[in-house]
């Protein structure tokens, strides 16, 4: 069959509203006057934050952080915070003026716009990444942060915690530690770089706002109710300048042509579109809300992925998120980041995974000016991108495995309910088989939370101390003291640490090496005169072994050092009163009374003075002191024992028996726990 030649007529495209606007399409877009004003406002917000911090540094106390995440404390415990009040006001104003706070008040948005401006100066304009499923992540995070605590507090906790106290309204508007709820610099700086920069480079302008910000998860739907919107009049000629300058990825010219207003909840009321309109056709005014426009009437959107691809993208995002944010356990060993940081990392990793699949499928693609696939072949840059994605993915999987191991370790460890005083005792009772099995399993899981160099999954483990402490305790439960000592020796060899020095002495004492434990403590007390726990431990160990004279001699030595704390003087006074002659009791009382002048409401000190008065036969003086001590610390079994002795001397047998029984109850309860 011969080819047939068909001539087609040329049809000219009608102009918007029937008006000639070709001249506007060729006219350069004028700079936005609102950008300068908005950046000035955003910089003023940063300045106010610095002023807030400076006030805290100068005064020692200040207004609590104006941070929306503080609302979680209000929802969980009924504590009204400044952040909760601020977030409520921001949401209420959004219901009137639209999503203005994101554009004019968010410090992360300033970083995003700054990054976009920097990329523009480099000749790069980040392309918007368009995903249907990922756009729901901010709402899911918002519900987790602000709705889940309410559901749990009122719908689940009452059934799981029978002793749950009713929520009581309280106020927390000031604080002494400004950084108490903020991460340190090692997390804060990477957070700003990733969420304020990398998300823009990968996902386009406002990438973090669109795919990761939980606050935007509430601002966006509330914006649908707002009567304040960008609206258009009849002067519009459809030139598209508004869309060209919009940094929120809103197709303004299409929206106003269809609905006479912008209905996209991504509009952050930056007002750039209003400023650059050559006909002054756009304005911010009040009228019908976006919710009045049905979804069927809204302009169709194009997406970068099929539904199958969307599912794979969501799986990658969830892997990235839960690998670095793991809320499922309170135990030690997990490596986790703040939620806002984790959401930004997850969105970026999901983009990298999607781009890698495009490369592997040899879909013509690239990243900014770099080609990944050219003429059906994967370029070197594409291979580098895939390798980088695989390395990051492997790291995320390792971190997820670390966190799951921490969860399993916490589960098994929580089943080992043996008091520490019994574990580190030479006369430890046999442990039942289920407890032994749980201890063994917990040790296995804890080992998997250690760094890879130590046989675990963790790539980065900032601190292993808490893990090692739990493992030593569990080895003690199993009676495996050699393994416990080896762990402590490994950690103590890295740097001197009083906690591990004390732990090593307890291991040696529990394993029957009492003399070695004493020698170790004496050595550490002399090497580290600044340590306070070691002298206390050594004195207690000497008393337990019946070496009272040695205990008194050592207490005299350490308490005579320059700058020795009152605690050691109190310890010496107690030893002299409990174990000494009449002269030593009087000396102990003199020491205790000097400290009592500085600490008149110290119940332990009152008990020591009361015991000294009993030893000297002045029981009537002792009883009021002991009554005052018990009023301050009614659950101290030692105070009840001393009071029982005083009552026995006074012939108050019934009262003495009460205090003796109460002391036994308290000691038995402590051992049972």
Image (cartoon, rainbow, N blue to C red):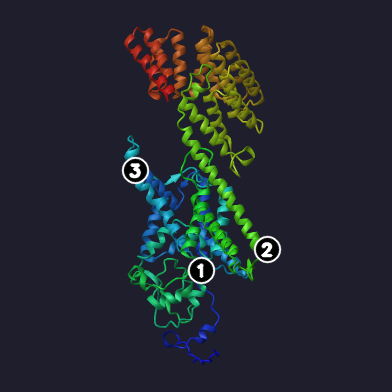
Secondary structure category for the residue under label 1: loop
x, y percent for residue 486:
63, 27
> Do labels 3 and 2 touch, CB within 8 Å?
no
Q: CA distance from mark 2 to mark 1?
A: 32 Å
Label located before the other in sequence (3 or 2)? 3
What secondary structure is marked by label 2? helix
Kindly tell me whether residue 304 is visible in this rendering. yes
Image position, residue 228 (x, y; %):
37, 69
Disc number for residue 156: 3
Local crowd size for mark 3, using a 10 Å CA cut-off: few (<14), some (14–19), many (≥20)? few
- Which is nearer the N-term, disc 2 or disc 1? 1
Q: In this rendering, which labeled residue sits more in front, label 3 or label 2? A: 2
Q: Position of residue 599 (x, y in %)?
A: 48, 25
For residue 79, which quarter of the picture?
top left
State left or right for residue 346 relative to residue 69. Answer: right
- Residue to which mark 1 is pinned: 247
> Can you identify the residue that label 2 sits on?
380
- The earlier-in-sequence mark between 3 and 1 is 3
Residue at 44% from the left image edge and 84% from the top image edge: 16
């Amino acid at each position: 069959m011969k080819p047939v030649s068909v001539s087609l007529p040329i049809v000219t495209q009608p102009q918007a509203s029937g008006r000639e606007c070709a001249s506007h399409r060729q006219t350069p877009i004028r700079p936005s006057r609102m950008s300068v004003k908005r950046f000035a406002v955003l910089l003023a917000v940063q300045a106010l934050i610095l002023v807030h911090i400076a006030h805290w540094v100068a005064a020692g106390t200040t207004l609590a952080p104006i941070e929306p995440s503080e609302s979680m404390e209000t929802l969980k415990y009924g504590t009204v915070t400044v952040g909760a009040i601020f977030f409520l006001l921001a949401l209420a104003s959004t219901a009137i003026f639209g999503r203005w706070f994101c554009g004019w008040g968010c410090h992360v948005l300033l970083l995003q716009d700054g990054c976009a401006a920097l990329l523009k100066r480099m000749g790069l304009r980040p392309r918007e990444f368009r995903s249907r499923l990922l756009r729901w992540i901010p709402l899911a995070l918002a519900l987790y942060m602000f709705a889940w605590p309410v559901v749990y507090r009122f719908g689940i906790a009452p059934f799981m915690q029978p002793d749950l106290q009713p929520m009581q309204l309280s106020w927390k508007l000031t604080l002494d530690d400004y950084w108490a709820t903020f991460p340190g610099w090692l997390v804060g700086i990477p957070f700003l770089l990733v969420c304020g920069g990398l998300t823009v480079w990968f996902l386009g302008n406002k990438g973090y706002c669109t795919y990761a910000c939980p606050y935007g998860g509430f601002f966006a739907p509330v914006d649908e109710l707002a009567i304040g919107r960008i609206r258009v009049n009849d002067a519009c000629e459809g030139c598209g300048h508004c869309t060209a300058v919009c940094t929120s990825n809103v197709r303004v010219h299409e929206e106003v042509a269809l609905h006479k207003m912008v209905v996209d909840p991504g509009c952050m009321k930056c007002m750039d579109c209003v400023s650059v309109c050559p006909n002054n056709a756009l304005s911010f005014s009040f009228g019908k809300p976006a919710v009045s426009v049905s979804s069927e009437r809204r302009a169709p959107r194009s997406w970068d992925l099929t539904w199958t691809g969307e599912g794979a993208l969501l799986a990658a995002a969830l892997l990235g998120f839960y690998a670095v944010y793991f809320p499922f356990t309170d135990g030690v060993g997990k490596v986790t980041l703040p939620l806002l940081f984790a959401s930004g990392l997850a969105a970026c990793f999901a983009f990298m995974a999607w781009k890698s699949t495009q490369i592997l499928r040899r879909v013509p693609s690239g990243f900014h000016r770099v080609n990944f696939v050219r003429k059906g072949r994967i370029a070197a840059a594409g291979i580098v991108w895939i390798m980088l994605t695989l390395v990051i993915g492997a790291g995320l999987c390792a971190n997820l495995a670390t966190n799951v191991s921490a969860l399993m370790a916490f589960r098994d460890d929580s089943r080992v309910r043996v008091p520490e005083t019994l574990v580190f005792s030479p006369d430890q009772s046999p442990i039942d088989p289920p407890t032994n099995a749980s201890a063994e399993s917990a040790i296995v899981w804890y080992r998997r939370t250690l760094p890879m160099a130590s046989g675990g999954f963790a790539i980065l483990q900032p601190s292993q101390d808490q893990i090692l402490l739990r493992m030593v305790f569990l080895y003690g439960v199993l009676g495996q003291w050699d393994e416990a000592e080896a762990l402590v020796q490994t950690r103590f060899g890295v740097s001197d640490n009083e906690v591990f020095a004390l732990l090593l002495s307890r291991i040696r004492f529990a394993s029957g090496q009492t003399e070695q434990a004493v020698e170790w403590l004496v050595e550490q007390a002399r090497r580290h005169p600044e340590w306070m726990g070691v002298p206390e431990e050594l004195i207690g160990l000497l008393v337990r072994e019946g070496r009272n004279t040695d205990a008194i001699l050592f207490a005299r030595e350490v308490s005579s050092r320059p700058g020795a704390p009152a605690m050691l003087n109190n310890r010496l006074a107690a030893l002299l009163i409990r174990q000494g002659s009449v002269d030593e009791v009087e000396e102990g009382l003199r020491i205790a009374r000097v400290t009592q002048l500085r600490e008149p409401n110290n119940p332990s000190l009152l008990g020591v003075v009361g015991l000294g008065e009993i030893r000297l036969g002045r029981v009537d003086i002792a009883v009021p002191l002991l009554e005052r001590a018990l009023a301050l610390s009614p659950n101290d079994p030692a105070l009840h024992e001393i009071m029982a002795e005083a009552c026995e001397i006074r012939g108050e047998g019934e009262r003495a028996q009460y205090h003796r029984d109460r002391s036994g109850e308290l000691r038995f309860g402590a051992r049972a726990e």
